[in-house]
Amino acid sequence: MKPIYVLNGPNLNMLGQREPSVYGAETLPEIEKLCRAKAAELGLTVDFRQSNIEGELVSWIQEARSKAAGIALNAGAYTHTSVAIHDALRAADVPAVEVHLSNVYKREAFRHHSFIAAAVNGVICGFGSHSYVLALEALASLINTNKKG
Ligand code: CA2
């Protein structure tokens, strides 16, 4: 079985160090652990990665087309800016879910638009680290019903 690529964008490596009231107190390695445990429960595996570089995220999404069963993507601030990530997701042809820790709709207006949303199966936001768990559950169900991105 191919892994789920859980991809994390810019500044998410800083989790737990700043802004716990917005993003929670957990670190990214702790969220990775949570994802591994949930994936095992669902009979899946995860390949968990983080990058501050837009092009690296684009390359990983391209790679997912042949190497992953699905994608859970927290693109961080690139969510609100990146046509390149939108285009990569459109071409990925595997189920994909947009994930956010915070409820972006309760925050600044510039976070209300996502370039990712139109290129994925669905969006989960506002549940802290549990957003990742919900994304894995959604992907498991999409994979079982054989839905492509
Ligand atoms: O809520 C989310 O998961 C976001 O994707 C997080 C991004 C933000 O730009 C999106 O609008 C919503 C930011 C992640 C930055 O995380 C930090 C954590 C600690 C300290 C500084 C930044």
Image (cartoon, rainbow, N blue to C red):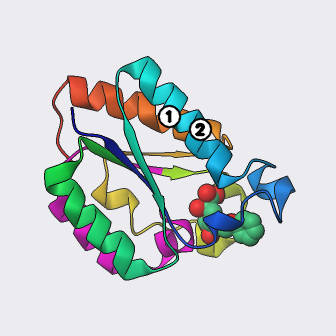
Q: Which is more toward the observer, 75 or 103?
A: 75
Q: Is there CB contact under 8 Å for labels 1 and 2?
A: yes
Q: Alpha-carbon neighbours of circle 2 within 10 Å: few (<14), some, or many (≥20)?
A: few
Say if the magenta span includes residue 91: yes
- The residue range painted magenta reads 74-98
In this rendering, would 148 be left or right of 55?
Answer: left
Magenta-colored segment: predominant secondary structure: helix
Observer able to see residue 96 = no
Residue located 71% across and 67% down the image: 14
Q: Which element type, helix, strand or loop, lies under badge 2?
A: helix
Residue at the spot of label 2: 33
Looking at the image, residue 18 lies above or below residue 68 = below
Percent across and percent down for residue 77 are: 56, 73
Residue located 31% across and 72% down the image: 58
Task: Check residue 79 in the rendering and tell me which mark sits there, or answer none.
Answer: none
Which quadrant of the frame does ligand 1 lie within?
Answer: bottom right
Q: What is the three-letter code of the residue carrying label 1?
A: Arg
Q: Which is more toward the observer, 110 or 79?
A: 79
Residue located 55% across and 67% down the image: 76
Separation of marks 1 and 2 at Cα, in angstroms: 5 Å
Q: What is the three-letter code of the residue carrying label 2?
A: Lys
Residue at the spot of label 1: 36
Looking at the image, residue 108 lies above or below residue 4 = below
Q: Which element type, helix, strand or loop, lies under badge 1?
A: helix
